[in-house]
Image (tube, rainbow, N blue to C red):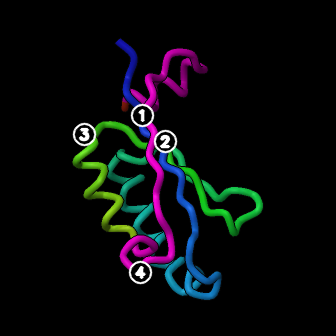
Amino acid sequence: MSPELFVLIVHHVGDPAEVEKHTPGHIAYLEKHHAAGVFVLSGQTRPEEYGGVILARGVTRAELDAVIAEDPFVRSGVSQYTVFTMGARRAHPDVLKAVRGEIR
């Protein structure tokens, strides 16, 4: 069975100045969930004003929804998430190890 991976697309819907105000809190949020091993990868889109992408693993969808609700971007209403679930089937072996939580 392949590991389940969540693909989170962060869409900025608020004024860019408001997004910027909440960026330090969002970065702390990312760091917290990377340290916990839930977020495997995160980064901004190009152009940056569109938002970002996060890969997450090791939680249920309900747990992930609770994690998303913590994001200062979401709490302030400047961003929304779209979430896809995928089974990681083909990837570099080191990527699969990270998705499975075998390496951090």
Please say whether residue 1 is one of the residues in the magenta stretch: no
Q: Secondary structure at mark 3?
A: loop
Residue at 63 percent across and 87 percent down: it is 17
| Residue beneath disc 4 | 76
Marks 2 and 3, how far apart at CA: 13 Å
Contact, CB < 8 Å: mark 4 with mark 1? no
| Residue beneath disc 2 | 7
* x and y, in percent, of residue 46 in the image: 75, 58
Contact, CB < 8 Å: mark 3 with mark 1? no
Q: Earlier in the sequence, mark 3 or mark 1?
A: 3
Q: Earlier in the sequence, mark 4 or mark 2?
A: 2
Q: Nearer the viewer, residue 79 or 70?
A: 79
Q: Residue furthest right?
A: 47
Q: Earlier in the sequence, mark 2 or mark 1?
A: 2
Residue at 41 percent across and 71 percent down: it is 74
Label 3 packing within 10 angstroms: few (<14), some (14-19), many (20+): few
Residue at 29 percent across and 53 percent down: it is 65
Question: What's the amino acid at mark 4?
Answer: Ser
Which disc number belongs to residue 60?
3
Label 4 packing within 10 angstroms: few (<14), some (14-19), many (20+): few
Marks 4 and 2, how far apart at CA: 22 Å
Contact, CB < 8 Å: mark 2 with mark 1? yes
Question: What's the amino acid at mark 2?
Answer: Val
Marks 3 and 1, how far apart at CA: 11 Å
Magenta region: 72-100
| Residue beneath disc 1 | 85
